[in-house]
Image (cartoon, rainbow, N blue to C red):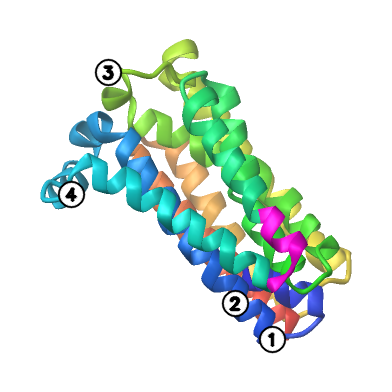
């Protein structure tokens, strides 16, 4: 979210509106997690047992109520930033509910919904500083890799999802889903130079992004040569994207 704000400002600068907006997004994210844990209780018992154990002392009702309270606080604080930012959070909340209640159990369309929702956080930073247009470029870069990551997570969670969901790996099989997921993640290799080509960042962006690309290439090639766990692929690609994120901040400065 800070990256979206910094891109909109054209420099690394913490304005009061951006700080308040970050607080609103943190509360919204906490609300997402609480509600997601509420709706995924049965799945988490299978694929995330430590998470389920940690939540044992909390009631389902508490998770449900706290999720909506946190989102309500986020929306209220968001309107202190600007009307457009408050409405943006409302729209994000509606999209989150649409995923959880409608598309989550419908295979690829559910993955696409998440791939739209998560990168919107970047655009929210631009909205907070009244210049969201540069962050749309990062949204475009993020969409396909996030989509690939979500498909791989469905493979990782397939045993738990069998209880009450119908995901893409169940429809097309795990090998095909893994190939598709890694294929979408691979698009980052071609899209990562875009911020520099669009003059959103300076030359200092390049070294970090080269490292991130090398990590991605390594894990992609290794996964094809030798079978490895989906969890490992997910964690390594997340690390590569973290380096890419840091590179963006360095490039903006």
In the image, farthest residue toward the right: 198
Provide the residue designation for mark 3: 163
Disc assigned to residue 20 = 2
Q: CA distance from mark 1 to mark 4?
A: 36 Å
Q: Which residue is mark 4?
A: 55
Residue 208 percent coordinates (x, y): 62, 72
| Real-space Cα separation, disc 3 to disc 2, in angstroms | 40 Å
Mark 4 is surrounded, within 10 Å at the Cα level, by few (under 14), some (14 to 19) or many (20 or more) other residues, namely some
User: Is tag 3's residue or tag 4's residue first in the polypeptide sequence?
Assistant: 4
Mark 2 nearby-residue class (10 Å; few <14, some 14–19, many ≥20)? some
- The answer to whether residue 21 shows anywhere in this view is yes
- The kind of secondary structure the magenta stretch mainly shows is helix
- Side of 39 where 225 appears, left or right: right
- Circles 3 and 1, Cβ within 8 Å, touching? The answer is no
In the image, residue 77 sits, relative to residue 12, either above or below, namely above
Q: Position of residue 50 (x, y in %)?
A: 16, 48
The local secondary structure at tag 2 comes to: helix
Give the secondary structure at mark 3: loop
Is any atom of residue 186 visible in this view?
Answer: no
- Tell me which numbered mark, 3 or 2, is placed earlier along the sequence: 2
**How many numbered badges does the structure rendering display?**
4
Quadrant where the image shows the C terminus? bottom right
């Amino acid at each position: 979210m800070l990256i979206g704000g910094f891109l909109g400002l054209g420099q690394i600068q913490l304005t009061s509106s951006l700080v308040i907006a970050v607080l609103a997004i943190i509360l919204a994210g906490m609300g997402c997690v609480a509600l997601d844990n509420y709706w995924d209780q049965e799945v988490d018992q299978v694929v995330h047992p430590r998470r389920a154990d940690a939540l044992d002392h909390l009631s389902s009702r508490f998770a449900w109520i706290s999720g909506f309270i946190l989102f309500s606080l986020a929306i209220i604080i968001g309107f202190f930033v600007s009307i457009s930012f408050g409405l943006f959070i409302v729209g994000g909340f509606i999209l989150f509910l649409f995923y959880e209640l409608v598309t989550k159990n419908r295979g690829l369309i559910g993955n696409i919904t998440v791939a739209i929702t998560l990168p919107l956080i970047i655009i929210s930073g631009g909205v907070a500083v009244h210049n969201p247009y540069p962050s749309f470029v990062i949204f475009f870069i993020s969409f396909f890799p996030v989509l690939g990551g979500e498909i791989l997570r469905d493979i990782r969670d397939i045993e738990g999802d069998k209880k009450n969901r119908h995901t893409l790996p169940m429809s097309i099989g795990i090998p095909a889903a893994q190939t598709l997921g890694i294929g979408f993640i691979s698009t980052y290799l071609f899209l990562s130079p875009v911020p520099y080509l669009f003059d959103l960042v300076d030359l200092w962006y390049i070294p970090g992004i080269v490292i991130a690309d090398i990590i991605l290439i390594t894990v992609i090639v290794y996964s094809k040569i030798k079978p490895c766990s989906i969890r490992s692929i997910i964690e390594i690609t997340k690390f590569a994207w973290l380096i890419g994120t840091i590179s963006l901040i360095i490039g903006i400065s």
